[in-house]
Image (spheres, coloured by chain):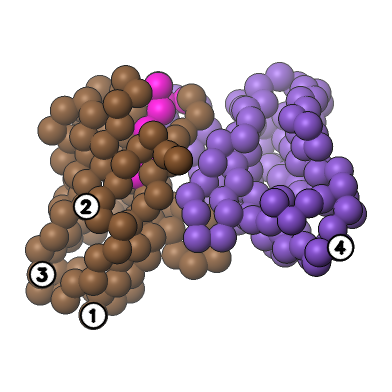
Amino acid sequence: DTEVTQTPKHLVMGMTNKKSLKCEQHMGHRAMYWYKQKAKKPPELMFVYSYEKLSINESVPSRFSPECPNSSLLNLHLHALQPEDSALYLCASSLMGNQPQHFGDGTRLSIL
Amino acid sequence: GQQVMQIPQYQHVQEGEDFTTYCNSSTTLSNIQWYKQRPGGHPVFLIQLVKSGEVKKQKRLTFQFGEAKKNSSLHITATQTTDVGTYFCAEIIQGAQKLVFGQGTRLTINP
């Protein structure tokens, strides 16, 4: 069981679609993260939010747009994705930026 | 770029054998975390090492942080089928809130 909830678990979308991934935690964590993970590779950091403010963008293409509506929620808005964007997208949270991270189950994204 | 190098990439053992994975860095690490990811699952935090020469144990798992804080290891004694998965070391880039993962060691076990 995970304390970080991600929806949806699976998503198939076309290259012209707009969709959003959602992440929620109620542990009072003030840092939240988006990672991208390709098969047999480690998670790669995309974005970091600290106290609801974007603190790190790892040069992610603008077709990925993060949003942090409040301290418990993190969204990732997707638009005009490419087939190479197919991957597992993991959300994580931590009490502070240097503390252990709690990961959600991820959204497995396929771009047609 | 990648801060920590992790070896081996794969390890297959017979159940009951021991297993070790190593992480090495060319620079001094502020601290290191270890995560386990089961097949089809998500990374799960195992431990964080902060002090030079630190050794921590969790049942059959032993974690070490080198004296120079440039390397770390995870040793599993008498593996069980539940140990199957990929073990990642990860470095926190101090002050940057950034966790950078090693390439991981994928452990498979023959029952």
In the rendered structure, the colour chosen for chain A is brown
Which of B3 and B76 lies nearest the eye of the viewer?
B76
Per the model, the C-alpha gap separating discs 3 and 4 is 47 Å
Q: Where is mark 1, residue-wise?
A: A112
Task: Please report, as a chain letter, where disc 4 is located.
Answer: B
Bounds of the magenta span?
A: A91-98
Q: Where is mark 3, residue-wise?
A: A17
Toward which corner of the image does residue A91 lie, by quadrant?
top left
Residue at image point 10% right, 69% down: A17
**Secondary element at image label 1:** loop
Horizontal placement of A27 versus A61: left or right?
right
The answer to whether marks 2 and 4 sit on the same chain is no
Per the model, the C-alpha gap separating discs 1 and 3 is 10 Å
Q: Where is mark 4, residue-wise?
A: B14
Toward which corner of the image does residue B47 lie, by quadrant?
top right
Marks 2 and 1 in Cβ contact (< 8 Å): no
Residue B87: percent from the left, percent from the top? 65, 49
From this viewpoint, is residue B68 visible? Answer: no
Which chain has been coloured purple in this picture? B
Q: Where is mark 2, residue-wise?
A: A21
Three-letter code for the amino acid on which mark 3 is drawn: Asn
Which of B45 and B1 lies nearest the eye of the viewer?
B45
Three-letter code for the amino acid on which mark 2 is drawn: Leu
**Secondary element at image label 4:** strand
Task: Please report, as a chain letter, where disc 3 is located.
Answer: A
Nearer the camera: disc 4 or disc 1: 4
Horizontal placement of A61 versus B8: left or right?
left
Per the model, the C-alpha gap separating discs 4 and 1 is 40 Å
**Residue B35 colored magenta?**
no
Three-letter code for the amino acid on which mark 4 is drawn: Gln
